[in-house]
Image (tube, helix red, strand yellow):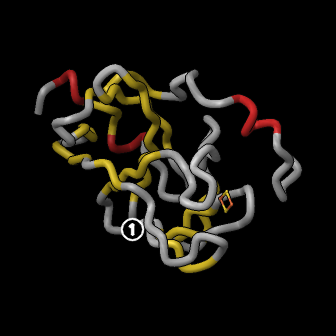
Amino acid sequence: MDDDRRITGLSEVPTDGTLLFTFRDGFDLGEAILTKLDDGSVVAFRNYCQHWTDVRLDKGSGALVRNGDIICQKHGATFGQETGYCDFGPCEGATLDTVDVEVSGDAVYLADDSLDFEHLGPSGEHDLSSGSRIDFTGT
Ligand code: FES
């Protein structure tokens, strides 16, 4: 794989949380989250809830992952860590948008040819107003 598409080392991707990265989609920046499954494979999803798409699942320090579910801290929707399918919450039946990634050797690469890897961490372009809404964790 092309070094420009290397996101991070495989060992950096948590199984009990997520790792945030920023990609470029044409002129726009977007965010995605990586998470490692029990079998060692890695999946990625775009970093927004299917209920309110201005709400980020990972605000920069990892999304909440519990019992194989990624949890939106705004209203508690749960998304299967492997599939992104929401089986509980206000967007039940919806599925997180996937981003193609690939593990090669000891690293994870962005495999979606329409996107370019930018950097680890947040894009800095998110709507700060969504962060000011109170969620059920009080954060
Ligand atoms: S914004 Fe995610 S569950 Fe409502």
Residue behind mark 1: 82
Q: Quadrant of the C terminus?
A: top right
From the top left corner, tell me how far across and down residue 78 is, in percent: 60, 70
Q: Is residue 110 above or below residue 73?
A: above
Label 1, residues with CA under 10 Å away: few <14, some 14-19, many ≥20: some
The residue shown at (11%, 33%) is 1
From the top left corner, tell me how far across and down residue 81 is, in percent: 46, 66
Q: State the SS at label 1.
A: loop
Left or right of 39 in this view: 86: right
Q: Quadrant of residue 21?
A: top left
Among all residues in the image, which is located at the extreme left? 1
Left or right of 24 in this view: 101: left
Q: Quadrant of residue 77?
A: bottom right
The residue shown at (61%, 35%) is 60
* Tag 1: amino acid: Glu
From the top left corner, tell me how far across and down residue 36 is, in percent: 40, 56
Q: Quadrant of residue 89?
A: bottom right
Residue nearest the observer in this picture, 21 or 9: 21
Left or right of 75 in this view: 133: right
From the top left corner, tell me how far across and down residue 88 is, in percent: 61, 78
Q: How many marks?
A: 1
Q: Is residue 87 above or below residue 81?
A: below
Q: Is residue 76 above or below residue 19?
A: below
The residue shown at (42%, 26%) is 29
